[in-house]
Amino acid sequence: MRLTPIQAAAIRRVVRQTAGDAARVILFGSRLDDAARGGDVDLMVELPEPIDNPAVLSARLSARISRALDGRQVDVLLAAPNLRRYPIHDVAQRRGLPL
């Protein structure tokens, strides 16, 4: 995994502060490949309750996490009971690593 323990802790902290204590965050994509270089941070944030404004929450999480990671590009995928599930959700679930 190409995140430091400090970066992983910062991500968990921002997700908890922004989406609540019940939110679960999963890292997936190129940051799991220790041999790769560069790339953005791909995260799936799972929420147990329906959310009202997913676009706003996703943008807010992405911006706050990016700031916590010194401007690193962050993509946030949301999973909640009221949101449509896409194949990328399954990829993140199967191949991702909980933070």
Image (tube, rainbow, N blue to C red):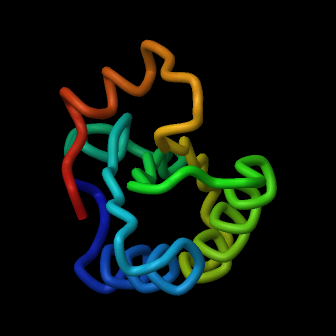
**Residue visible at 39% across and 55% down in the picture:** 48
Query: Residue 20, percent across and down?
Result: 48, 78
| Count of all numbered marks drawn on residues in the image | 0
Instruction: Judge left or right: residue 95 versus residue 18.
Output: left
Q: Residue 90 appears in which quarter of the rendering?
A: top left
**Residue visible at 47% across and 39% down in the picture:** 81
| Depth check, front residue: 26 or 1 | 26
**Residue visible at 59% across and 78% down in the picture:** 18
| Depth check, front residue: 43 or 55 | 55
Query: Which quarter of the image is occupied by the C terminus?
Result: bottom left
Instruction: Judge left or right: residue 29 versus residue 18.
Output: left
Is residue 46 depicted above or below 71 in this figure? above
| Depth check, front residue: 35 or 16 | 16
Q: Residue 52 appears in which quarter of the rendering?
A: bottom right
| Depth check, front residue: 3 or 15 | 15
State the residue lying farthest toward the top. 87
Query: Which quarter of the image is occupied by the N terminus?
Result: bottom left
Query: Residue 96, percent across and down?
Result: 24, 39
Query: Residue 16, percent across and down?
Result: 44, 80
Query: Residue 97, percent across and down?
Result: 20, 48
**Residue visible at 31% across and 65% down in the picture:** 3
Q: Residue 91 appears in which quarter of the rendering?
A: top left
